[in-house]
Image (tube, grey):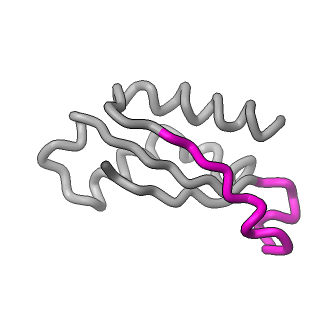
Amino acid sequence: MSTQERIALVTERLSALHPTHFEVVDESHLHAGHAGAQGGANHFRLIIGSDQFEGLSTLAKHRLIYSHVQDLIPHPIHALAIELK
């Protein structure tokens, strides 16, 4: 699976949150040589905003996001850094 296919999969999964802001940035090149990158897994930065986050703690927002992509971790996605908008 290519990086673009992985980004498309994350985008598709998180579309359920009806994001008001959404970016996926591939940061895999910053982690070259890292143990998680050895198997070809990606490191992504997710920048996301959603009305569904209203009233939730940061931890609850992260849990909501991970509930949609948890089967993709640790492979094909090794790491997912989350920035909330």
Q: How many numbered dots are placed on residues in this image?
A: 0
Left or right, 85 with respect to 33, comes to left
**Which residue lies at the image location 40% right of the left edge and 25% below the top edge?**
16
Measured from the top left, where is residue 14 in percent x and y?
Answer: 46, 33
Q: Quadrant of the N terminus?
A: top right
**Which residue lies at the image location 52% right of the left edge and 60% below the top edge?**
81
- Residue range (magenta): 23-41
Measured from the top left, where is residue 15 in percent x and y?
Answer: 44, 26
Residue 53 picture quarter: top left
Residue 17, placed above or below residue 44: above
Left or right, 17 with respect to 52, comes to right
Residue 51, magenta (yes or no): no
**Which residue lies at the image location 44% right of the left edge and 48% below the top edge?**
47
* Depth check, front residue: 9 or 26: 26
* Depth check, front residue: 59 or 34: 34
Measured from the top left, where is residue 59 in percent x and y?
Answer: 30, 61
Residue 19 picture quarter: top left
Residue 23, placed above or below residue 36: above
Measured from the top left, where is residue 64 in percent x and y?
Answer: 36, 45
**Which residue lies at the image location 65% right of the left edge and 36% below the top edge?**
7
Left or right, 3 with respect to 84, comes to right
* Depth check, front residue: 64 or 31: 31
